[in-house]
């Protein structure tokens, strides 16, 4: 890194060691990444999840934490603050940024069998608005152009890689191969009235993607990510509660999005349910769509 970086672009770790802020980091890597790779990193930075590299040192550190009991699949109630919804029931942002989130530690996610995954929950590092303000203030610095070019496709609040992929395929602009649909509420809390609490066994739900005015909810069921601690019972109780509120609930799995033939068949139904048109399937659009899909799922 250059040694003349502005102080506001640096975080002091002590001992003479500094790291760049998340906004500066994204700016500095923007020109080295493809647009799709950059968008995926932007979604992660503006969301509530992290997927660290699968290197031997990371595995060793996680195994040590598991062996010591520092992290476990169980989360006793009231033991510590946890990360849940991104927006509260009134649509207000519920989570602070990382710099303000000392009370919200990183939390390893486990699958329904209690096995650790690569997914971690953590407070959002930044937001689309903060990144836009930052690049407006740095002039013509290298990386501004590619970052500004893709920023319009980013949506705050994603909680898993699958959610990010679905949001890009559905709501990304046609120029990147997305359908350009209206963005949903992402991970917004819905409180259940007392009669529905009895039905669902829960006081509230946090749908992955919700078009509130259209009464449609998409739940992204990743193979190894974003699973519920109690598994089948919690998922089905939540669905029963949401349907009792009048929502139509559609579930999307990793395997369905990964297979373009299946995904295209599902899109027809999504389009009718949401009353949002599919992009005209021109050769140019299909080429961009196939490139977006191929890069999203080729990154894993």
Image (spheres, rainbow, N blue to C red):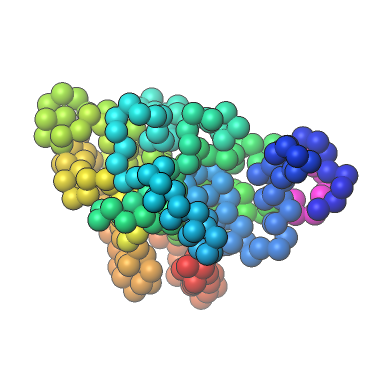
Count the marks. Answer: 0
The picture places residue 155, in percent across and down from the top left corner, at 51, 45
> Residues in magenta?
137-146
Residue at image coords 61%, 37%: 129
The picture places residue 134, in percent across and down from the top left corner, at 72, 39
Residue at image coords 62%, 54%: 150
- What secondary structure do most residues of the magenta stretch adopt? loop
Is residue 183 found left or right of 29 in the rendered image?
A: left
Q: Is residue 70 magenta?
A: no
Is residue 130 found left or right of 14 in the rendered image?
A: left
Q: Is residue 135 visible?
A: no
Q: Is residue 65 visible?
A: yes
Query: Which quarter of the figure has residue 37?
Result: bottom right
> Up-down: is 200 above or below 208?
above
22 vs 63, nearest the viewer: 63
> Up-down: is 203 above or below 18?
above
176 vs 200, nearest the viewer: 200
The picture places residue 147, in percent across and down from the top left corner, at 68, 52
Is residue 202 found left or right of 291 in the rendered image?
A: left
Query: Which quarter of the figure has residue 9?
Result: top right
Q: Is residue 139 magenta?
A: yes
Residue at image coords 75%, 43%: 17
Residue at image coords 22%, 45%: 230
121 vs 194, nearest the viewer: 121
Q: Residue furthest right?
A: 4
The picture places residue 128, in percent across and down from the top left corner, at 59, 41
């Amino acid at each position: 890194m250059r040694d003349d970086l502005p102080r506001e672009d640096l975080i002091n770790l002590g001992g003479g060691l500094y790291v760049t802020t998340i906004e500066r980091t994204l700016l500095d890597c923007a020109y080295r990444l493809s647009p799709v790779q950059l968008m995926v990193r932007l979604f992660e930075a503006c969301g509530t999840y992290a997927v660290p590299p699968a290197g031997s040192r990371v595995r060793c550190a996680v195994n040590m934490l598991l062996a010591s009991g520092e992290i476990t699949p169980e989360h006793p109630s009231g033991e510590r603050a946890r990360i849940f919804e991104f927006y509260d029931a009134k649509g207000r942002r519920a989570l602070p940024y990382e710099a303000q989130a000392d009370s919200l530690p990183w939390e390893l996610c486990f699958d329904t069998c209690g096995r650790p995954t690569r997914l971690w929950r953590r407070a959002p590092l930044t937001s689309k608005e903060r990144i836009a303000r930052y690049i407006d203030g740095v002039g013509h610095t290298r990386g501004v152009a590619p970052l500004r070019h893709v920023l319009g496709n980013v949506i705050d609040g994603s909680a898993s890689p699958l959610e990010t992929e679905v949001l890009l395929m559905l709501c990304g602009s046609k120029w990147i191969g997305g359908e350009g649909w209206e963005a949903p509420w992402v991970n917004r809390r819905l409180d259940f009235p007392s009669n529905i609490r009895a039905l669902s066994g829960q006081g509230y739900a946090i749908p992955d993607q919700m078009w509130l005015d259209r009464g449609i909810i998409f739940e992204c069921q990743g193979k190894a990510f974003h699973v519920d601690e109690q598994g089948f019972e919690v998922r089905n109780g939540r669905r029963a509660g949401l349907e009792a509120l009048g929502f139509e609930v559609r579930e999307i799995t990793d395997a369905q999005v990964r297979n373009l033939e299946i995904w295209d068949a599902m899109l027809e139904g999504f389009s009718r349910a949401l009353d949002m048109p599919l992009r005209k399937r021109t050769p140019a659009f299909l080429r961009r769509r196939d490139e977006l899909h191929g890069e999203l799922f080729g990154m894993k």
